[in-house]
């Protein structure tokens, strides 16, 4: 897609700027003033599969995201560069491929190898925006203070905090278990990945608590407060939700939205024919949970509970997205705000007998992407292929910025040279580094 086409897709054509009123049935369109700076609401969800109502999936209930998508552009063929949090987020936020960032694992900070890279929020900051972040945008522990005017402190809308979550849990028995494990790990002197591998509890939790009992409810509250405070200046507000990442913990009311007996289990719970073992994963992220067998098959009733929990978490963040969008309207900001919603990669929910990410199969590499243009009548579905870094590179041309996003792919030697496809077209590809290999997955066929 060329620059002009991308701008058109976002609703910003060369001739005129349409402005829509969020949530209203009747739309109004007005010409934007030259040089206007639309606000950016940049919402991320961790490990969110593109299995939402707006993608034609009826099993998962996401009315707020569906409503957002109905007024924007849905990318139905968006793929991550790498199905792992840190690598894909470093790629997305820098506009550079993993070959260029040098970030292939969760342990590397992208600044170590790219000290001068201009990130997307940094670009907006350099162009006169107030840039704010709350929750997980960069990978946890790999934050980038220079990108932000302000890193928001978690706050609630006057409601008291519940007891500080222990490992993200709220049920007393889960909190007790997690704290015991944490204390034991501390006495053993564990650190780093060893400590992280020990700090786990059960894979799911269904507690009858308010939204603010878990981090994402507080993140939504904090974003709402930020909208109220900064509504009179151009802003780039990044809101990073932690769910539906493991553990699948969500308030009971979101679990109650689903009848577990009606949830569809994976239709292909077996490895692909002739699949090399290197392409699979041990599902260690799930297996490390205290209530999950360390090996062997995942029983159907457990698989159903996991899918139930994942779905509840998706509906939980959908509700938080809805609360933030409602505030956007209440503050009178909806007419001049571009909303982008994205997931960092997919997740295997039993497909190919795998649970988790870190594989290159479709269900891990494909991701959610639904930028909402501030323009009337731009509901559209884009079936052409997108990768995260391409998406952000095009974002260099977003309105409100005087200069292009300056990150460029340095002339580094690629770890892997993608072959050409039909018509000498380069494929879109995801990759995943194993200790002994760097595994690419190519996609040529446009469907
Ligand atoms: Ca993730």
Image (cartoon, rainbow, N blue to C red):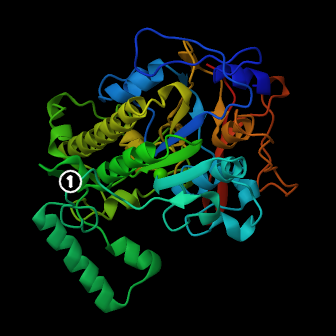
Give the farthest residue toward the top.
Answer: 26
**Residue at the spot 37% in from the left edge and 51% down from the top edge:** 222
Residue annotated with mark 1:
159
Disc 1 is placed on an element classified as loop
Nearer to me, 65 or 52: 65
317 left or right, relative to 421: left
Determine whether the beta carbon of the residue marked 1 sits less than 8 angstroms from the nearest atom of ligand 1: no
Q: Nearer the viewer, residue 1 or 431?
A: 1
Q: Residue furthest right?
A: 411
| Residue depicted at 40% across the width and 15% down the height | 24
Residue 233 in the image: above or below residue 109: above
The C terminus: image quadrant: top right
Q: Residue at x 32, y 56 (%)?
A: 215
In the rendering, at what x and y percent does residue 363 appear?
A: 47, 38
- Asked if residue 10 can be seen in this view, the reply is yes
Query: 237 left or right of 304?
Result: right
Position above or below: 11 against 371: above
Q: Position of residue 397 (x, y in %)?
A: 75, 34
Give x and y (percent) for residue 345.
Answer: 51, 44
On the question of residue 299 being in view, the answer is no
> Compared with residue 378, is residue 218 higher up or lower down, i.e. above or below?
below
Label 1 crowd (10 A; few <14 / some 14-19 / many >=20): few
Task: Report the number of discs.
Answer: 1
The residue nearer to you, when weighing 60 against 266, is: 60
Residue 442 figure quarter: top right
Image location of residue 241, percent across then percent down: 40, 49
Q: For the N terminus, give its image quadrant.
A: top right
Left or right: 175 as drawn, with respect to 15: left
């Amino acid at each position: 897609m060329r620059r002009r086409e991308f701008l058109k897709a976002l609703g910003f054509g060369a001739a005129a700027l349409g402005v829509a009123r969020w949530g209203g049935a009747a739309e109004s369109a007005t010409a934007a003033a030259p040089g206007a700076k639309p606000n950016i609401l940049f919402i991320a969800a961790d490990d969110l599969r593109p299995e939402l109502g707006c993608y034609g999936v009826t099993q998962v209930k996401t009315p707020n995201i569906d409503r957002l998508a109905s007024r924007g552009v849905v990318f139905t063929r968006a793929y991550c560069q790498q199905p792992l949090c840190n690598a894909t987020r470093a790629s997305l936020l820098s506009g550079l491929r993993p070959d260029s960032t040098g970030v292939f694992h969760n342990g590397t900070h992208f600044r170590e190898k790219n000290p001068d890279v201009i990130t997307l929020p940094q670009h907006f900051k350099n162009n006169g925006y107030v840039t704010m972040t709350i929750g997980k945008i960069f990978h946890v522990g790999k934050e980038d203070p220079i990108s932000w005017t302000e890193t928001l402190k978690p706050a609630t809308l006057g409601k008291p905090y519940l007891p500080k979550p222990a490992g993200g849990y709220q049920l007393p028995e889960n909190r007790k278990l997690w704290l015991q494990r944490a204390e034991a790990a501390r006495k053993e002197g564990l650190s780093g990945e060893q400590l992280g591998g020990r700090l786990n509890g059960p894979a799911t939790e269904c507690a009858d608590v308010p939204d603010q009992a878990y981090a994402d409810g507080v993140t939504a509250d904090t974003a709402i407060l930020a909208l109220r405070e900064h509504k009179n200046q151009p802003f780039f507000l990044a809101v990073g939700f932690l769910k539906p990442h493991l553990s699948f913990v969500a308030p009971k009311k979101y679990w109650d939205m689903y009848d577990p007996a009606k949830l569809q289990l994976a239709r292909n719970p077996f490895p692909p024919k002739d699949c090399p073992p290197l392409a699979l994963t041990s599902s260690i992220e799930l297996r490390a949970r205290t209530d999950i067998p360390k090996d062997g098959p995942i029983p159907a009733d457990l698989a159903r509970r996991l899918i139930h929990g994942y779905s509840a978490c998706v509906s939980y963040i959908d509700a938080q997205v809805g609360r933030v969008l409602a505030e956007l309207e209440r503050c009178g900001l909806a007419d001049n705000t571009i909303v982008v919603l994205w997931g960092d990669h997919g997740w295997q929910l039993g497909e190919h007998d795998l649970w988790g990410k870190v594989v290159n199969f479709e269900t891990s590499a494909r991701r959610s992407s639904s930028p909402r243009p501030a323009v009337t009548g731009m509901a559209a579905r884009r079936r052409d292929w997108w990768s995260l870094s391409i998406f952000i590179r095009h974002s260099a041309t977003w309105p409100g910025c005087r200069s292009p996003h300056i990150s460029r792919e340095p002339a580094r030697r690629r770890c892997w040279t993608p072959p050409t496809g039909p018509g000498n077209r380069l494929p879109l590809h995801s990759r995943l580094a194993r200790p002994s290999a760097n595994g690419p997955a190519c996609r040529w066929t446009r469907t």
